Image (cartoon, coloured by chain):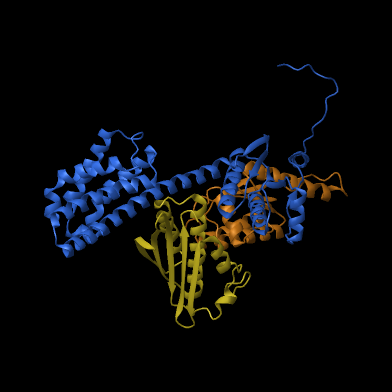
Chain colours: A yellow, B blue, C orange
Amino acid sequence: MLVVLNKDAFQIQREQDVILFRNRVKEFAVRIGMGVVNQTKLITAASELVRNMLRYASGGEVLIEVITRGRENGIRLTFKDQGPGIPDIKLAMQDGYSTGRSLGLGLPGTKRLVSEFDIKSTVGVGTTVTIVKWKNG
Amino acid sequence: MLALLRSKKPQILERWIQHQLTLDTLRDDLISNDELREQSEGIVNLIVDQISEQTLALDPYALEPILEYLSGIAISRARHGFSPRETSFYLFSLKNAMLDMLAESAGSDIAALYDMTRSLGRFFDELSTSTFETFIKGREEVILRQTDEIAEISTPVIRVWDQILAMPLIGTLDSARTQVVMENLLQAIVDTGSEIAILDISGVPAVDSLVAQHLIKTVSATRLMGAECIISGIRPEIAQTVVQLGIDLSQVITKATLASALKSAFSMLKLEVRKTQSQKPFLI
Amino acid sequence: MERIPILRMGSFLLVTIQVDLYDRLALTLESDLVQAISKTGAQGVLIDISAVSIVDSFMGRIIGNIASMARLLDAYTVVVGMQPAVAITLIELGLTLPGVQTALNVEKGMQLLQSRIQVTASVEEAPNEDDDAGSPE
């Protein structure tokens, strides 16, 4: 049973927002007592996704939530954009695949950094990526 | 029924104590009769005062004060060494005492007695289930704390030489533990400024592809920070399984023993261990 | 505009990154550093990231680029002081910074550069022993 304890929405429009957004995620992670390594993994994953959002959809909105499943707390981030969408998610989730001028480890690398990863995309409508990082996960 | 219970409070308590004294789950070795009476009185007072239409309907908010009080009792009984069975029977005997009271005053109205019995039974089921949960939760917390402690103490970092660290791994490696191992090792490398870390896996019972992957990650992270990591303590069986599973450890420096790992660490640091010519007397 | 200072230490350049690099700042650093190598004829570059808590794939690419560009100008790059949490995250992300040398701290990085340069210097020196070894100035 998942319960949302606290939430906040963050608009991403410019590249400077990336740093502000990372700091906000960090505040939430520190508040639930997440360890340094898991914090770093979560913030790095968030950074990757938010950059994707800027690069492919020129911005969007992120929902930051503190969630709990009984004993354990975690952070859930939902990245929502109205970009072109991803035609083939399976392909995009393969290591080494990229359409942009990046290193091509965006999505699969990001997935390895978090506890749960979910992506939904409709071409021409937009993409929603949800990640969860448990405090000890 | 509620009014009846309230007016019969002293009798319920008396009846309950009598009940308890006949039970074989009575532990007069753990709690004196006076203490037991005091504890029981507290519970009867609370339950009889708090019992209402809402609590009988199991409304969580109305139940809260009762459950909280009982959790306290359950925890304290668990600490005193009562078994969960003894604590459950303790509560059940209160239910019986209350039912006896109801039966005596209900007379021949069987239907009404049945209704009261049913709702009181449901109420007590809820109480004992939640007391039991509290008991289990207490145990779980102990287990979790011990798991953390094991993870903490089972990954010591030893400074074997200037610039050389060793970490003997004992027990099964899973993802959570590898993370602790990696973190401790890398932090120790930063703190001591050591260039070489030796991970000794003599005490790891089996290496499957997941464990191997964890080891490779630890080595890569060490290198990324600018230090080197040697894996030692590869037993023959481990060498066999690693190759049979097709795991590629060729990028990792592996040694059979901690001694040979230390030797190659020395040569990497351009250090030499030599026997001295003349034997100096030992000063103790 | 904000800039990351580049310090000159003998034939080496030292860059200490103490703030979160947003994209433009990172790109400015990249071009400033390449200019500085070319202007000073530096043989080595030390990038101290001990105060950096997040290295994502963008930042990883900047570091990789700096190393490759410096190499073209005949200078070695050593990244020093990477935090354990950052190293663990980069490995999980799949970013191993190929072609970038690393060291635990500035001192060790300096030793690494010196040994590197000595090796190349002694090779270059071999045909003509009278040449001034080491620094070109």
Viewer-side residue, B231 vs A44? B231
Q: Quadrant of residue C62?
A: bottom right
**Residue A85, visible in the rendered structure:** yes
Instruction: Determine the residue positioned at 58% across, 44% down.
Output: B184
Q: Nearer the viewer, residue B56 or C119?
A: B56
**Picture coordinates of residue A72 (x, y %)?**
43, 55
- Residue found at the very far right of the displayed protein: C127
Image coordinates for residue A4, horizontal then vertical, percent: 36, 62
In the depicted structure, whether residue A59 falls above or below residue B37: below
Instruction: Identify the residue shown where x is 57% and y is 76%.
Output: A90
Relative side of B6 to B125, left or right: left
The number of numbered badges drawn on the structure is: 0
Instruction: From the top left corner, tell me how far across and down residue B204 is, in percent.
Output: 66, 47
User: Is residue C81 among the parts visible in the rendering?
Assistant: no
Quarter of the figure with residue B42: top left
Q: Nearer the viewer, residue C10 or B130?
A: B130
Q: Does B125 sit above or below residue A62?
A: above
The one nearer the camera, C89 or B116, is B116
The reply, left or right, for residue B38 in relation to residue B191 is: left
- Where residue C50 sits in the image (x, y, percent)? 56, 47
